[in-house]
Each structure stands twice: as C-alpha cells, then as structure tokens.
Amino acid sequence: MGERSVELPGLGTKFELDTDHGDKVAVIFLNTGKNQLYLLEKGRDTPAVANLTPAEARRMGSVLTGAVIEAEKEAVEIAFSALSDLRIRVHTYLARKNLAGKCIGDLQVRTRSGATIIAVARKGRNFISPPPSFAFEEGDILVLIGERDQLSAFEREILGI
C-alpha cells in the first residue's frame, strides 16, 4: 500500500493511496474549502468522483474510522492506558421538540443523569460549555460527555427514549 501527497498549485493538495487490492483512492483538499474524493478501481480507466463539503468530509472520515453510530447520534469512547478501568464517552444527540425552550439548568441534566453537556451546535454556530441558562431549540445538536450508564440515564431521564 503506497501513499503520497502532491501540491496542486492554485488548486489545493491531493493525497493518494494505492490499496493492497490495486485500487487507487485520492482526496483533493481544494483551496475553496471543498473536498473531492476519487476512486479508480483496478482495471478501470475512469474514476468515480464525489464532491464533499467540509462537514461531509469529516462525517466520511468518522465513518471510515468506525466512530459513527447513526447520523443523529455519534459517539466516541476514550480508554486511557494508565487508567484501565476508566472509559469516557463523548456522544451527540439531536434536540427534538420536547427540549425546545428548556434550559440546561431547569432540566438538571447532571443531577438527573451524571452526564455533562459540553457543547451545542445550532445552525452553524457552536456554543462551548453552555451555561445553565442556555435554552435549547429544536434541531440543536447536543454534545455530552460521561460514562456509558450516565449517557443511558440522559437518554432515559431527559430525552425520554
């Protein structure tokens, strides 16, 4: 398996990978901020191409590493080598209508579940460490951190799922 990167003057940077199977995969990061993904299967003359936004490229990266569970619910579990019994999860949830207008403090998220809301994404804007007075809107993406049982309690106690 070989890989290389090539600067494309005025366009961006291309990263190429030759797979063990004989296929060629290339990703081009364009100076415009967009990305292109090319796949040239062994024995073919013409590659398939997909144009991706930066968000789509990040999602694809997560898919390829196995970090994505569902489109609305992503999770990463972190295990520390020095603390073998500690596993922390970072998980996203979509705020549905039942959370709209409710504040973090009023929901008592940490008291009721043990999980902590560390960020909220809303319409292209991110709120890191939102205060207890932060009110949710339907469609917000909530980022929580906690142990598996704490996130399960959040789903049950706060989201009602």
Image (tube, grey):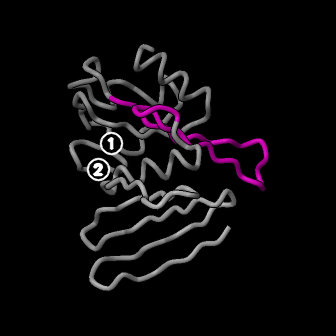
- Disc 2 or 1, which lies upstream in sequence? 1
Number of residues whose C-alpha sits closer than 10 Å to that of mark 2, classed few (under 14), some (14–19) or many (20 or more)? few
Q: Main secondary structure of the magenta part?
A: strand
Is 64 above or below relative to 40?
above
Confirm whether the magenta stretch covers residue 72: yes
- Residue under numbered circle 2: 126
Confirm whether the magenta stretch covers residue 117: no
- Residue under numbered circle 1: 120
Is 86 above or below relative to 82?
above
Q: Residue at x 28, y 17 (%)?
A: 98
Q: Position of residue 126 (x, y in %)?
A: 29, 50
Q: In this rendered view, identify the residue nearer to me: 38 or 150.
A: 38
Q: Residue at x 48, y 71 (%)?
A: 15
Q: In this rendered view, identify the residue nearer to me: 62 or 8.
A: 8
The answer to whether mark 2 and mark 1 are in CB contact below 8 A is yes
Image quadrant containing the C terminus: top left
Number of residues whose C-alpha sits closer than 10 Å to that of mark 1, classed few (under 14), some (14–19) or many (20 or more)? many
Q: Secondary structure at mark 2?
A: strand
Amino acid type at circle 2 is Asn
Q: Position of residue 139 (x, y in %)?
A: 26, 31
Q: In this rendered view, identify the residue nearer to me: 80 or 10.
A: 10
Image quadrant containing the N terminus: bottom right
Is 34 above or below relative to 13?
above
Amino acid type at circle 1 is Val
| The magenta segment | 69-94
Q: Position of residue 22 (x, y in %)?
A: 64, 61
Query: Is 64 on the left-hand or right-hand side of 131?
Result: right
Query: Is 17 on the left-hand or right-hand side of 74?
Result: right
The quadrant where residue 13 appears: bottom left
Q: Residue at x 47, y 21 (%)?
A: 155
